[in-house]
Amino acid sequence: MNYTENYRGVKIDVQSVNLDISDAVQAEIRSCIDKLSKFTNVINAVDIYFKNEGQGASAESVVGMRVGIPGPDVFAEDKGEHWIPLLKSVTDKNIRQLKKGK
């Protein structure tokens, strides 16, 4: 499931391979953008990538997030079991990068 959304002037591009993104995860994406907005004046776009790696018991969920800002973009990725904690983790990683760039 891939979808694009405009949220408060930020273009959100979500890409997932053979996965459906629930409404709860979509709401968390918007919450993450609100959180990121506190640390930078302009966010042009946010690209979020969802995928599963591995098979069976060794399968892991992977979330990557690229935040398009003036200058170099920031990107973070994390692996785990559940989408929402992974989204929070990559958001926090991107916030640390935004703070370093100031």
Image (spheres, rainbow, N blue to C red):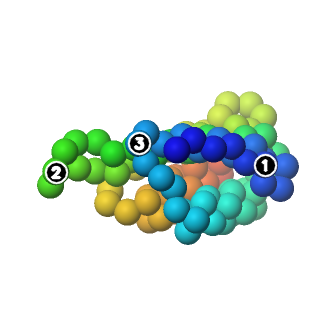
- Say which amino acid is labelled 3: Asn
Residue 32 vs residue 6: left or right? left
Q: Mark 3 — residue?
A: 18
Residue reaching furthest to the top: 72
Of labels 2 and 1, earlier in sequence is: 1
Q: Which badge, 3 or 2, comes first in the chain's sequence?
A: 3
Frontmost of labels 3 and 2 is 3
Spot the residue most to the left: 57
Of helix, strand and loop, which one carries label 3?
loop
- 3D distance between C-alphas at marks 3 and 1: 23 Å
Is 59 left or right of 9, judged from the image as shown? left
Give the residue number, with chain letter if any, for mark 2.
56
For mark 2, give the secondary structure. Answer: helix
Residue 90 spot, x, y in % from top left: 50, 53
Q: CA distance from mark 3 to mark 2?
A: 16 Å
Q: Which mark is first along the chain, 1 or 3?
A: 1
- What amino acid is at disc 1? Asn
The answer to the question of whether label 2 and label 1 lie on touching residues, with beta carbons closer than 8 A, is no
Q: How many marks?
A: 3
Q: Could you tell me if the residues under marks 3 and 1 are in contact, i.e. CB atoms within 8 Å? A: no
Tell me where residue 28 sits by quadrant. bottom right
Residue on which disc 1 sits: 6
* Structural crowding at the residue carrying mark 3, measured as other residues with C-alpha within 10 Å and reported as few (<14), some (14–19) or many (≥20): few
Residue at the image point whose x is 65% and y is 35% from the top? 73
Q: Residues within 10 Å of mark 2 (few under 14, many from 20)?
A: few
User: Up-down: is 4 above or below 22?
Assistant: above
Q: Position of residue 34 (x, y in %)?
A: 72, 63
Q: Amino acid at mark 2?
A: Gly
- Front one among 31 and 38: 31
Q: Is residue 45 visible?
A: yes
Q: Residues within 10 Å of mark 1 (few under 14, many from 20)?
A: few
